[in-house]
Image (tube, helix red, strand yellow):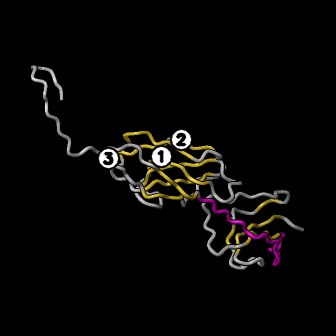
Amino acid sequence: QVTHYFVYLAVGASGAGRSIVGSALQVGTNTIFVDPETTKGSLSYVTVFTHSSLLEATTPVALPISDTYQVVGNITFDDQDLDPLQVGGNITWDEPESEALVTAYVVYLATSPAGAGRSQVGGEVPDGVLEQPLGPEHYHTHFTHVVVYTKSALVEQTTPGFLDLEDIVSSVTGLTFVDKDLDELELGG
């Protein structure tokens, strides 16, 4: 008679190279939660073993793991703030190939393509919206990248899409003015 179940992530369908998920499940329980950011590595199957008062069964039921990777593409940022060390404009991106699990996007300025030292730009962007405005005169003295993360109902992804941050600077050079109005406190020319 089955007394409980054990759920494992395993390398093979037979349960080889397995790692337990949670603790024993009572008979009648048919769901278990896998923590976000659980390292998959070479684990390819979810396996469930029955257990009696004497021992664990040797043959599990196995289900292949479906690992979802959804990263945005084609991130663009057209800096409209022409002052040095300041940026501003719209950040846009293309949705992932399959956006079935995406509930939102989160945009940051960061100090690396991996999102280190990041600072969030605005709030979460709902699925279906593919841009986030970055207000003018935003100082970016140490930020080098724009990073965009997808977010599911469970968690924000750990590997973002990224773009090198480029500060467009435009200023007038060679400016001259000669006052040709000969009256005091008046200009002309």
Tag 3 residue: 170
Span shown in magenta: 51-71
Are the residues flagged by discs 2 and 1 in contact, CB closer than 8 Å?
yes
Mark 3 closeness class: few <14, some 14–19, many ≥20 residues within 10 Å: few
Image point (55%, 58%), residue name = 74
For mark 1, give the secondary structure: strand
Tag 2 residue: 123
Image point (62%, 54%), residue name = 95
* The N terminus - image quarter: bottom right
Q: Which mark is residue 120?
A: 1
Residue 50 drawn at (x, y percent): 82, 69
Mark 1 closeness class: few <14, some 14–19, many ≥20 residues within 10 Å: some
The quarter of the picture where residue 22 lies is: bottom right
Q: Nearer the viewer, residue 30 or 179?
A: 179
Residue 21 drawn at (x, y percent): 69, 65
The amino acid at mark 2 is Gly
For mark 2, give the secondary structure: loop
Disc on the earlier residue, 3 or 2: 2
Q: Nearer the viewer, residue 184 or 165?
A: 184
Closer to the eye: label 1 or 3: 3
Find the distance from the CA under tag 3 to the CA under tag 2: 29 Å
The amino acid at mark 1 is Gln
